[in-house]
Image (spheres, helix red, strand yellow):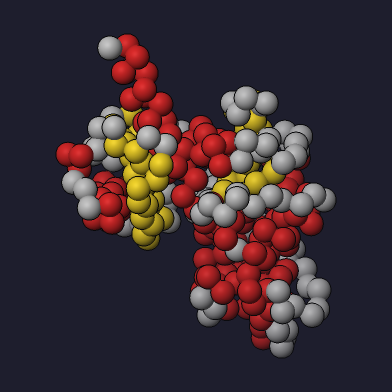
Amino acid sequence: MIVAGCDIGSLTAKAVIMESGKILSFAVMRAKTRPAESANEVMQMALDKAKLTKNDIGYIVGTGYGREQIPFVDQVESEISCHAKGAWQTMPSVRMIIDIGGQDAKATRLDDNGNVARYIYNDKCASGTGRFLEVMAEALEVPLEELGKMAAESKEKLTISSQCVIFAETEVVSLVNEGFKTPDILSALHHSLAKRVASLARSIDVKTDVVMTGGVAKNSGVFNALSEALGIELKALNGFDPQLMGALGAALYADEKVREMKKAG
């Protein structure tokens, strides 16, 4: 049976369509103001890629910030559970997942069977989130997808000391006005974010192997800065797009549910 997972975050919407454990298609888009609108659009994108209609999907699981507003799901699961299931499926050796989303950051420890053992998240301050990077990219007039590449060109070590996004933005503007180069400022921003997230992860005891999920994992500057802050080498998810991990986990939950229903007759 064909199943799907739909992950509606605060900044992006993702969908994955699967059949018998094989991914048929996926889609990613910028989230709309209304989660239901995002869900309908991203799911249609994935359906079009697979040349399917919604009637072809036997079971759909929703996750993410807007999961309760997805109009067509059969079941909802937390982002923590879905990222855990997706990461475990992609890399069974994983024991900790760090998910930096648009509005929060989460650290999740897994047991030897891939189940969630402990987790912690910070949704009180944007300074350790994807939104922090968006604000800084706008302030520096640098495309979001270029942040990591540009930060790699840094030659001078700077420090961003502000704990608040608003104050950090003011600090960045001051550094620009003082003549510091953009790559150096970006590197400092990445290390500032990484320091906050590493502190979050350490509070539940870091266990290797550690992977990053979510869209921020695509930023090589954050990836490398977090490896440095944790004192370990983060693992890449075997070539799988880390931004799709929640939607993949949701699709795996859907596949699992279908199998259970078949067994029950």
Please state, as top left, top right, bottom left or bottom right, where the N terminus lies in the image. Answer: top left
Number of numbered callouts drawn: 0
Which residue is drawn at the image coordinates 71% and 70% (left, top)?
Answer: 187
Q: Position of residue 71 (x, y in %)?
A: 23, 39
- Residue shown at 35%/14% (left/top)? 263
The foreground one among 30 and 249 is 249
The image quarter in which residue 156 lies: bottom right
Q: Is residue 243 visible?
A: yes
> Looking at the image, which is closer to me, 22 or 103?
22
The residue positioned 61% from the left and 41% from the top of the image is 91
Q: Position of residue 208 (x, y in %)?
A: 75, 39
Question: Looking at the image, which residue sits at the far top?
Answer: 264
Q: Is residue 206 above or below residue 171?
A: above
Asked if residue 69 lies left or right of residue 237, the reply is left
- Residue 15 lies, with reference to residue 254, above or below; the image says below
Q: Nearer the viewer, residue 5 or 160?
A: 5
Quadrant containing the C terminus in the rendered view: top left
- 142, above or below 47, in the image: below
Residue at the location (62% across, 24% down)? 113
- Residue 134: image location, x then y, percent: 52, 66
- Inspect this view and state whether residue 105 appears: no
Q: For residue 122, which quarter of the picture?
A: top right
Query: In the visual, does 208 lie left or right of 62?
Result: right
x and y, in percent, of residue 136 in the image: 57, 70
Q: Is residue 45 left or right of residue 16?
A: left
